Amino acid sequence: MPMRIKWVPELQSWGCPLPTIDPQIVLRSASRLPEFGSDFRYGHYARVRALPTVIAAVSAVGVIVGLTQFGPTRELLKRVKKSGDGPSEAQRKKGWFEVTFLGRSGDLRVTTAVAGGDPGYSETAKMISESALCLALDRKKLPETYGVITTAVAMGPVLRERLVKAGMRFQVKS
C-alpha cells in the first residue's frame, strides 16, 4: 500500500510520509516478535497541522534535491552548513521530540507516545549508550538471539526500562 499525505482525525493533523528506514526496521521486528501478529502494518509520517505547510515542505525538499544534482549549486549548498557545524549547547537544551503511535485492532484504538530532549544529539547518545549497557550488563534478562536482529528483538522491554531511567518518556495517551 503506497504511503500518501492523509488527514488523521485522531490528531487533527495531516500525516506526511517520511522517507526513512524506520518502517523496514519496525516491520522486521514485528515479523520476529509474535506479539505483533501476522496482520501488523506500520506507516511512518510527520504530523503537520496545516496542508499549506505540507505542500511548502515537499516543494522545498524537491527544490533542494534538484539543486544537488548540479555541481555548481551542490557546491553552494555545501557552504550553507559546513561539516562539523551543529547546534550550540543552548539550542540543544531547547530541543525536543515526541513520536505519537496510533494503534488499531478491530474496535480497539490506542494512542501512545515516546518523548525526550534533543533527538539529534542528546537522546541519540542516550539510546546508543543505554543499548551498549543493556547488552553488556543485562544479558541474563535478554532473549537468546543471534545474527542480524533489530533492537526491539534483541533488547525490547529491558532497553525501554533503561531509557525511562535515563529520562525518556513512554506513555499511553488513550
Image (cartoon, helix red, strand yellow):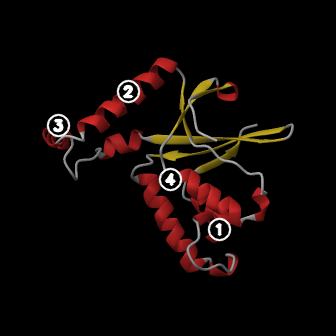
Proximity of marks 4 and 1: CB atoms separated by less than 8 Å: no
In front: label 3 or label 1: 3
Give the residue type that dot 4 points to. Ile
Q: Is residue 39 above or below residue 147?
A: above
* Label 2 SS: helix
Mark 2 residue type: Ser
> What percent of the width, then of the height, locates residue 12?
64, 23
Residue bearing the label numbered 2: 59
Q: Give the mark nearest the N terminus, 4 or 3.
A: 4
From the image, state whether disc 4 or disc 1 is nearer to you.
4
Q: Circle 4 is placed at which residue position? A: 21
Q: Are marks 4 and 3 in contact (CB under 8 Å)?
A: no
Work out how far the residue at label 2 is from the one at label 1, CA to CA, in angstroms: 37 Å
Residue that label 3 marks: 73
Residue at x 45%, y 48% (from the top left corner): 119
Q: Give the secondary structure at mark 3.
A: helix
Disc 4 from disc 3: Cα separation:
27 Å
Q: CA distance from mark 2 to mark 4?
A: 22 Å
Callout 1 environment at 10 Å: few (<14), some (14 to 19), or many (20+)?
some
Amino acid at dot 1: Val
